[in-house]
Image: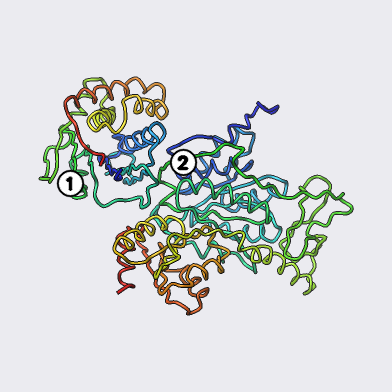
Amino acid sequence: MKPLKIRFCGFGGQGIILSAITLGTALVTKKGYYAVQTQSYGSEARGGQCQAELIVADEEVRSPHSDEKDVLVAMSQSALDRYVSDLKQGGILIVDPTLVKEIPEVDGQVIEVPATQTAVDLGNRIAANMVLLGFVQQATGILTKDELLSAVQDLVKPQFIDINTRAIEAGIELAEGINLEVIE
Amino acid sequence: MASDGSNPQSRVLTGVHFMLGNYATSEGALAAGCDFFAGYPITPANEISERMSQRLPEVGGTFIQGEDELFSIYAVTGASIAGAKAMTATASAGYNHFQEGIGYAVAVEAPCVIVDVQRCRGENFATQADVMQMRWGTDGDYEIIVLAPSSIQELFEYTVRAFNLAEEYRTPVIVASETTIALMRERLDIPTAEEIEIVNRKYTDLSPDEYKPFAAPEYGVPDFAPLGEGYGTIYSINPHDEEGSIDWDPDVYERMYDRLTGKIAKNRDVICQPRSFAVDDADIVLIAYGSEVRPALDAVQMARDEGIAAGLLKLDAVWPVPEEQIKKATAKAKEVISVEMNIGKYANEIERVVAGRVPVHRCTKNRGIIHSPEEIYRSIKEVWK
C-alpha cells in the first residue's frame, strides 16, 4: 500500500483536528494500520486558519509531513486557497459549498459535499465535520462504517455521540453512488 | 484491586492506540512505575502534566503543580531520595530553570526523569536546539544520560528506559522530546505489564549503623536507603565522603567526582544502543537522533534508489556519546553527514569522535520545522558529487 495522505483544512472551531484524529484512531485502532497526524493552527481560540494532516500506511510512517496530498478536504475559502497547491496531480478535492464559493482549477476530482447544510438540517451546525467523515468513509471505502463509529464512541463525550452518529450516517447517504479510489 | 483501592493493571494501558506524543511520554512513565510528578506549565509540554494529573491519582501516585520550575525539580529530587520514582517535564525555556536542581540531583545521586520538550524561543516551533544545554547546563563536573526518541512508540519506550537507567545508575536521566513528536499523534503499541522490563534501584541490606550512603565500588553505584527510615543521610551538593560527611579534602573531592562521572562514562557502551541502517557498505553515513531520524531514513532510501550507497546511524542516547559505535559505523565511510534541527551542535561531537579520519558535513535546519526527506537527500547529493 502506498501511504495515503489526507489534509483537512478550515478554521478553528470546526473540528478540523478532531476529524483527522477520529479518522486516524479508526484506521489505527480498529483497522490495524499505521498513521501519523500533525496539525497547525492560529493562536486564536476560534476563527484562525487550521489544518490537520494524516498519513496512513500499512507500515511505520517515516517523515511526518508530505508535500503532495492525495485528498484535500476544505471547509473554508481561505484554507482552500492556501492549501490547494499541495494537492497532487489527479488528487481528490472535497469542499463544502456553503463555505467555499470559488473553487480554483485543479488537476483532479472536485466533489462538493453539502456538509454544513446537512448538519444544520440535523439540528447542529458543528457536526459538519462528521458529515464529511461519513462521506469519506463511504466514498473511499478505506474503513467500514462500524470502524468509524466505534472510534467516535472512543473519542466523543457521551452526550455528543448521537448527533455525531447521525451526521456520519447522513454523510454516508451523500456518498451514495460515489466511488473514490484512494488506495494504491 | 489492590488494598489501597488502586488497580495496578491500569498503570499499563496494554493495546493499540493512536496517541499524542506527550500522552505517550506520560504512559511510559506510568508503565515504568512513576509514582510522583511535579511540574510547572509550559507549552508544548502541558499535555504531559495534564495526563499525569489525571492518571497518577488513579494508580495511587502523587501529582503536584509547582509554583515554578525550581519547586518542581527540587520536589522531584526530594521525592526520589524518599524512595519515589519521580518525574518532571518542561520545555526549553523552563529547562533553563531546572539546571541548578539537576546539578543537585547529580551530586546526591537522586534517580529521576526529566522531560524536555524542545521548542524554539518563545514559540512551539520544532527544534533540537537544547542538545547541548541538556549536557552542559549545570555547574561542576558531571556526566548525564540523555535519550532522544524519534516516534510516539519511542517516547513511550525511552521514557520507560529513562526510569530504568535512572534507577540503575542513580542519576537524573533526560528524555529529549521535541515539539515535532510531542504534538503529533501516531500508532502506539503498549505491551503487557509482564513484557515491560522494570529496573529498581538497589536498596541496602545493612543496618543504619553499618550503612555508608555513598560507598560504592570503583565507578559503581551506592546502595540506597530511603530518607525517613533512620539512616540519617546528609544529601549535600558539597563534596562528601562515603559516609555523606561534607569534606573538602582534595582526595575526597577527586574520588567522588571520579566515581560520579565514571559510573556513566565507563558504561557508555551499555547505555548507548544506537541502531544502524544500511551502514555496512555505505560510502556516506548519516548520523541523526530524535525526530530527524525519520526524514533521514527516507533520504537514505531515496539515495539507495539512485544507486548512492548511503546509510544511517540512529542514536538513542545522545549523552553519553556512543563513541565506539560512531567509530565503528563510520569506519569504512568516505563521508559523514550530521543531520540536526539546530545550527549544528552535535556535529562537533561527531567530528571529535572521528578525529579527522573522515569529513563530517552538516545538514542543519534552524527554521522551526523538521527537514523534509528531499532536503536531506539534496545534502547527500551535494556531498556525493
The residue located at (76%, 51%) in the rendering is B224
- Residue B287: x percent and y percent? 44, 65
Q: Residue A154 in the image: state x and y as whole percent.
A: 42, 28
Location of residue A22 (image quadrant): top left
Viewer-nearest of discs 1 and 2? 2
- SS at badge 2: strand
The label number, if any, that marks residue A81 in the structure image = 1
Q: Is residue B225 above or below residue B15?
A: below
Towards the viewer: B53 or B286: B286
Check the image and name the residue furthest to the bottom: B356
Q: Is residue B198 left or right of residue B186?
A: right
Labels 1 and 2 positioned on one and the same chain: no
Task: Estimate the spatial distance between the alpha carbons at disc 1 and disc 2, rounded to whole Å.
Answer: 34 Å
The chain identifier of the residue carrying mark 2 reads: B
**Within-10-Å neighbours for mark 2: few <14, some 14–19, many 20+:** many
Q: Which amino acid type is marked by label 2?
A: Leu
Left or right of B207 on screen, residue A107? left
Q: Quadrant of the N terminus of chain A?
A: top left
Q: Residue at x 36, y 43 (%)?
A: A37
Which secondary structure lies at badge 1? helix
Q: Which residue is mark 2?
A: B188
Identity of the amino acid at label 1? Asp
A144, above or below A105, in the image: above
Number of residues whose C-alpha sits closer than 10 Å to that of mark 1, classed few (under 14), some (14–19) or many (20 or more)? some
Residue A110 numbered tag: none
For residue A32, side relative to residue B106 (left or right): left
